Amino acid sequence: MHQQDEDHPHVFPESRKPGEILFVTISMTIALLLLAAIPWQTTWLPGKGLAAQPRLWPALSLGGIVLFGLLNAMSRVRVTRTPGRWQEAGVWLRSLEFIGWYMLYVLVIPVIGYLIATLAFCTGLALRMGYRGRTVWIAAGFGLFVVLFFKSGMNVKIPSGAIYDHAPGSLRYILMRYF
């Protein structure tokens, strides 16, 4: 074997990664459930071309997930399994925490406003990930940039926070309009 061959991984690895089949199974199951729900979630528009139908692209995407997941599973099932499947699944479950943080962010925007919620979200995630000092300030700056870009620059209509109702008249307008 040449030195170059040892430095680069093989295109088709000879062992499965922990949790690989579990991931494919979960992905295909969710895609199949969503595919089965398409008739109730979308419609077929009479007189429209195939590419303009609302259910075509979601159906193709979900069908692709199922097809390629099945092909992946069939190609990997006979390959030697690396132990650690459930430890890997535990890592995935722990990562769901961040979905919770995002859902909390979305829920508090109508209460405390887009500016405060975004600043708290960005700096809070930086702190949660273990960053300190300058990086937290960068996260806060990023949050401020996001708010100014979307609300002021792009004029995106995001409902203002209920907390803004307690601000004096002219300040309230500025907060509701730009922050």
Image (cartoon, helix red, strand yellow):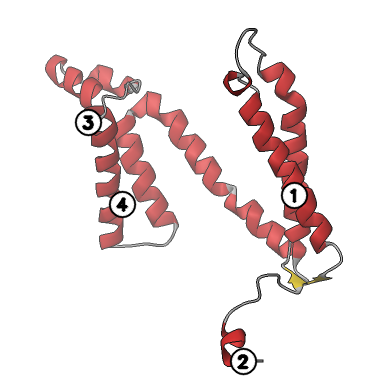
- Which residue is the site of mark 4? 139
Of the pair 5 and 96, the residue shown nearer to us: 5
Q: Is residue 170 above or below residue 107?
A: above
For the residue marked with disc 4, what is the amino acid?
Ala
C-alpha gap between disc 3 and disc 1:
41 Å
Mark 1–mark 2 Cα distance, whole angstroms, equals 33 Å
Between tags 4 and 2, which lies in front?
A: 2
Quarter containing the C terminus: top left
Question: Split into 4 quadrants, where in the image is the N terminus?
Answer: bottom right
In the picture, measured across the screen, residue 111 lies left or right of residue 69, that is left
Residue situated furthest left in the rendering? 170
Q: Amino acid at mark 2?
A: His
Disc 4 element? helix
The front one of 50 and 112 is 50
Numbered disc in front, either 2 or 3: 2
**Element class at badge 3:** helix
Viewer-side label of 1, 2: 2
Dot 1 amino acid type = Gly
Dot label at residue 69: 1
Q: Are marks 1 and 4 in contact (CB under 8 Å)?
A: no
Q: Residue 84 in the image: x percent, y percent? A: 75, 68
Label at residue 153: 3
Real-space CA distance between mark 1 and mark 4, rounded to the nearest whole angstrom = 37 Å
What residue is shown at x 68% (from left), y 58% (from top)? 90
Residue named by callout 2: 2
As displayed, is residue 82 above or below residue 76? below
Q: Would you say residue 2 is visible in this rendering?
A: yes
Indicate the secondary structure of the residue bearing disc 2: loop
- The residues bearing labels 4 and 3 have C-alpha atoms spaced at a distance of 20 Å
1 or 4: tag closer to the N-terminus: 1
